Image (cartoon, rainbow, N blue to C red):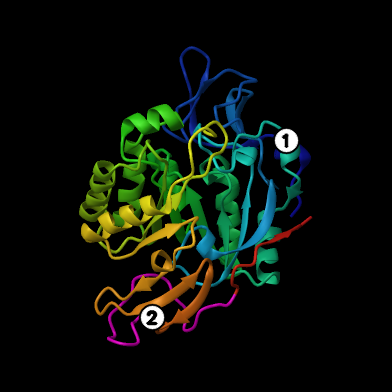
Amino acid sequence: MSIPQDKLSAWPTRYWHRLDDGRVQCDMCPRACKLKNGQRGLCFVRACEHDSIVLTTYGRSSGFCIDPIEKKPLNHFLPGSPVLSFGTAGCNLACKFCQNWDISKSREMDTLADAATPEALALAAVRLGCRSVAFTYNDPVVFHEYAIDVAQACHEQGVRTVAVTAGYVCDEPRAEFYHYIDAANVDLKAFTERFYRNLTGSSLQPVLETLVYLKHYTNVWFEITTLLIPGENDSVAEVEQMTTWIAENLGLEVPLHFTAFHPDWKMRDIAATPPATLTRARQIALKNGLKFVYTGNVHDPAGGTTHCPTCGTAVIVRDWYELTSWKLTENGDCLVCGAICPGVFDQSPSDWGRKRIPVRLA
């Protein structure tokens, strides 16, 4: 199926309503942008045309790449397997520390160099040997309609879907979206409203609601990532509060990744996160009962290893994104004591390793 050029720039959407003053309110995320004809929301890719909200990036991508699934990061979802990753342009947050700012903050449609229908993308994943397709680089919340169509096409080909998201979305579109998603990594950026307000231009509470929704109302496998920024969200008190909340509201088995900040976008004056900060945060989370806590963006074999929650055996050992040891059955049972390691596993791990390969689908 080819996509008509006129629809590429104005794909119809349904999460919006008209206001009494003649404007149209977008109901995709809690930002609730109120727009006149010709205006775009903060995300830049959802626009008001002919008194309705349209998506301007349907079927267009900033690029495709085959990644290790651990790079999302997902450590308990088809470990070692390749995932076909792609994003579009725009974002509904305004993070001053954005690590993908050239994509998420793009205002140039030339960024969208690749085009692919949902069916073509799903078939490409099969052809390239990818077990899953990831919506990443920018938040799939802003290309909701395209992501859902891709997910449906992928499922028809036996390919699973992964969402890498900040979780900042309204209730109704959230429920529709996760109906089609197999796994997610939610970026819990901090645990204070101050941080969310000042550094992301959003709020914390909707993100917590997304996490609770995923845990209690879906079968989506999900993991959490927190980028620790020196002096902003890395205090002992905040990590204590956050990991206690996770334990009490999401359970002890949800994997949590602490990753290292590096100077970028509008926060180039802050130093990179010391590895010791990640290690300290991991120790706090483990102390508070979380069973699967990882470190990222640094070489830390201990922080990359998955241990059996019962006997402590190192059931998956990683060197960066490469698996070097595997002691699980296809059901995720520990080969030593038989206890279940939660996640989605194969009988044996894939061996994609650390490779990252850009591809063109056009």
Q: Is residue 334 magenta?
A: yes
Q: Residues within 10 Å of mark 2 (few under 14, many from 20)?
A: some
What amino acid is at disc 1?
A: Met
Indicate which disc residue 109 carries. 1
x and y, in percent, of residue 208 in the image: 32, 43
Horizontal side of 8 relative to 158 (left or right) equals right
Main secondary structure type of the part rendered in magenta: loop
Q: Residues within 10 Å of mark 1 (few under 14, many from 20)?
A: some
Secondary structure beneath label 2: loop
What amino acid is at disc 2?
A: Asn
x and y, in percent, of residue 185 in the image: 44, 54
Q: Which residues are magenta?
A: 333-351
Using the rendered view, name the quadrant where residue 341 is placed: bottom left
Quarter placement of the C terminus = bottom right
In the displayed structure, would residue 274 be above or below residue 269? below
- Label located before the other in sequence (1 or 2): 1
The residue under the point 69% across, 46% down is 62
Q: Nearer the viewer, residue 199 or 143?
A: 199
Indicate which disc residue 331 carries. 2
